[in-house]
């Protein structure tokens, strides 16, 4: 595997995800390589700002969009029994 990392510029910060909000979801554009110009949604762990450069080891996979949830939605799901649990 002789391929190198592809640089990608952060265009937009979409939000936080993860159990504790430790992962930041960003939209970035690949700047070099065979996928140059491709816009991806990726998860980033650690501090990141618009304009930062990420070095992506692969440019094929994208992150799933994080669902926007709040405490009220979670309570409604529990009442309806929609929360995935053991039977």
Image (cartoon, grey):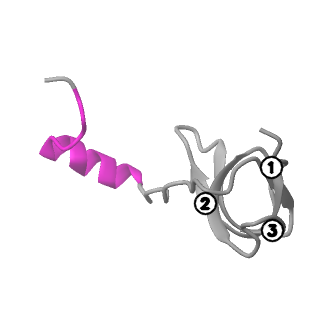
Q: CA distance from mark 2 to mark 3?
A: 12 Å
Going 60% across and 53% down the picture, which residue do you hit? 16
Callout 2: SS: strand
Q: CA distance from mark 1 to mark 3?
A: 11 Å
Q: Residue 57, how many percent across, how many down?
A: 75, 47
Judging by the rendered image, the residue that carries numbered circle 1 is 47
Going 57% across and 38% down the picture, which residue do you hit? 20
Judging by the rendered image, the residue that carries numbered circle 3 is 50
Q: In the drawing, what numbered circle is on residue 15?
A: 2
Q: In the drawing, what numbered circle is on residue 32?
A: none
| Total count of labels | 3
Contact (Cβ within 8 Å) of mark 2 with mark 3: no
Q: Residue furthest bottom?
A: 37
Whether 69 is drawn above or below 2: the answer is below
Whether 45 is drawn above or below 33: the answer is above
Q: Residue 1, how many percent across, how many down?
A: 77, 38
Callout 3: SS: loop
* Residues in magenta, as a range: 70-85
Number of other residues with Cα within 10 Å of mark 1, as a class: few under 14, some 14 to 19, many 20 or more? few
Q: Is residue 81 magenta?
A: yes
Quadrant that contains the C terminus: top left
Q: Residue 15, how many percent across, how many down?
A: 61, 60
Q: CA distance from mark 1 to mark 2?
A: 12 Å
Q: Residue 36, how many percent across, how many down?
A: 76, 71
Going 82% across and 70% down the picture, which residue do you hit? 31
């Amino acid at each position: 595997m002789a391929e190198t990392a592809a640089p990608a510029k952060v265009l937009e910060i979409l939000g936080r995800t993860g159990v504790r909000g430790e992962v930041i979801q960003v939209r970035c554009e690949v700047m070099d390589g065979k996928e140059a110009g491709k816009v991806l949604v990726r998860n980033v762990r650690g501090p990141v700002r618009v304009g930062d450069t990420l070095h992506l080891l692969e440019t094929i996979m994208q992150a799933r969009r994080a669902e926007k949830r709040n405490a009220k939605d979670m309570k409604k799901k529990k009442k309806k029994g929609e929360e995935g649990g053991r039977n």
